[in-house]
Structures are given as C-alpha cells and as structure tokens.
Amino acid sequence: MSNSIGLRQGFLKCHKLLVQRIDPTGLMIELVTTNIISIDEKEMISKESVPSFMTDKLLTLLHRKAVFDPAVYHKFLRAMEEEETLKSAVDDVRAAAVQQASGGNGTHDYTYTSYVRDEAYSAALKAHERTIVTGLTASDILPELVSAGVVSPVENESIRDGESRDEQAKRLLNIVRLRGSKGFLGFRNALLNSESQQQLGSLLSVEAPDDKQYG
C-alpha cells in the first residue's frame, strides 16, 4: 500500500510533465487491452480534440480509479513502459515516487493536498458546467484571463475562433481545467470582476485546502 502511495505522489508531481509527453491515443489502446480503462472511458476521453486535454482527463481518471484500487498506478506504469517514447517519463515518475516515499525535499510541484484542492475545483466546474456554457460570454473576461496568465495569446485566439458563444465557453472551460487551481481561481475572479458575469462567479464558491493561500 505504501508503495502505491509513493507512486500516487510520483504521478501527481509529474502531472504537468506527463500531460506534455504522453500521446494518449496509442497508450489508451494498451490501457483498454489490460482492462485499466473501459472502451466507454476511452471514447469519452477521445472526444477531446487536443492531446494534452485528453492526457489530463486520462490522468484524472487514473487518480479516481486508484482511490478504490491503488494497484492501478502500477498497471498504468507498466502500460507506459510498453511505449518506447515514454520510458524516460516512467523513470521520472519512479524517481519522484522514491523521493516522496523517503520524505521528499519540500520542493515538490504537486502534492496530494494540491490534488484534493484541484478535484474540489473541478467538481464545482462540472456541477455548474451547463449553466456556465449557456450563460458565459467568454470575450468579456478573456482580457483579464490573458493578463493573469490563465489563457495564452494563442489560446485566446483559439477561443475567439469558436463558431458560437457556447463553443467559445466550452473551449475556455477546457483550458481552465488544464490550469488546475490557478485556472479555476483566475476564472472565478474574472467572472466576479465582470459586472455582466458576477452571477456565474458566485456559483463557483467552494472551500478547498489552502484556498485562502491561492485566492
């Protein structure tokens, strides 16, 4: 069990690195074959058009499954080892796991507290997603989100290229989720600072670990 906790911390610490490195399309075939994820889960993740968004969803699913079956981390790591291009990422996860199991050095990027906080924020977004998508005018808050570093200039253009207001809102929410707590808090603050969007911001009031530190 303790080894699984170390791997959990290893995956959490390397989350951003894995989002950048993993090509989820090939890996998910192996994960389905080894019954780590279902075909329905694979199809749900595949609906994302951006590989990094797919990987982020895949890793989030991994952590949720591991709550009930910690061995999922070991199975996922073995699946990664089957991909030649992911062997260095596997080494990074293992090294981070060993570091965390031995007490770490206090400089880790993503702790379990961070994970719990991000999960609380993600749940709040999911609970109010339909209301936000139908009510949000993304262009009203994009300047503040770009200024805060939540949305990049390239992402800003991609959002504005959405064919409808709903599509623009969906694209923005995908990016907010990928940014973790920084994305959520930046998004919520931008809504609260906008006279036309304050009501949506009030929907996202949520208590989470270290909320005051990041607010």
Image (spheres, rainbow, N blue to C red):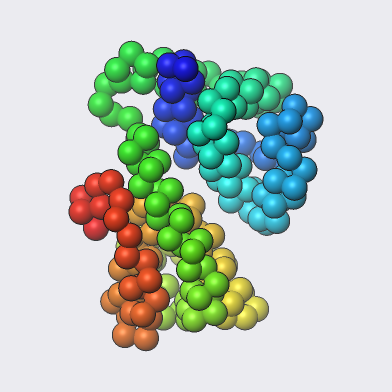
The image shows residue 122 at horizontal and vertical percentages of 45, 55
Horizontal side of 15 relative to 58 (left or right) equals left
The image shows residue 96 at horizontal and vertical percentages of 42, 22
Query: Which residue extends farthest left?
Result: 212
Quadrant hosting residue 185:
bottom left
Q: What residue is at 37 percent from the left and 35 percent from the top? A: 112
Q: What residue is at 38 percent from the left and 59 percent from the top? A: 184
Q: What residue is at 32 percent from the left and 65 percent from the top? A: 205
Horizontal side of 214 relative to 138 (left or right) equals left
| 73 over 167 or under it: above or below | above
Query: Which residue extends farthest bottom?
Result: 196
Judge by depth and name the residue closer to the eye, 149 or 166: 166
- Picture mark count: 0
| 155 over 119 or under it: above or below | below
| 165 over 98 or under it: above or below | below
Query: Which residue extends farthest front?
Result: 68
Residue 211 in sight: yes
User: Which image quarter is the C terminus in?
Assistant: bottom left
Judge by depth and name the residue closer to the eye, 145 or 177: 177
| 26 over 79 or under it: above or below | below
Residue 92 in sight: no
Q: What residue is at 62 percent from the left and 36 percent from the top? A: 22
The image shows residue 1 at horizontal and vertical percentages of 47, 17
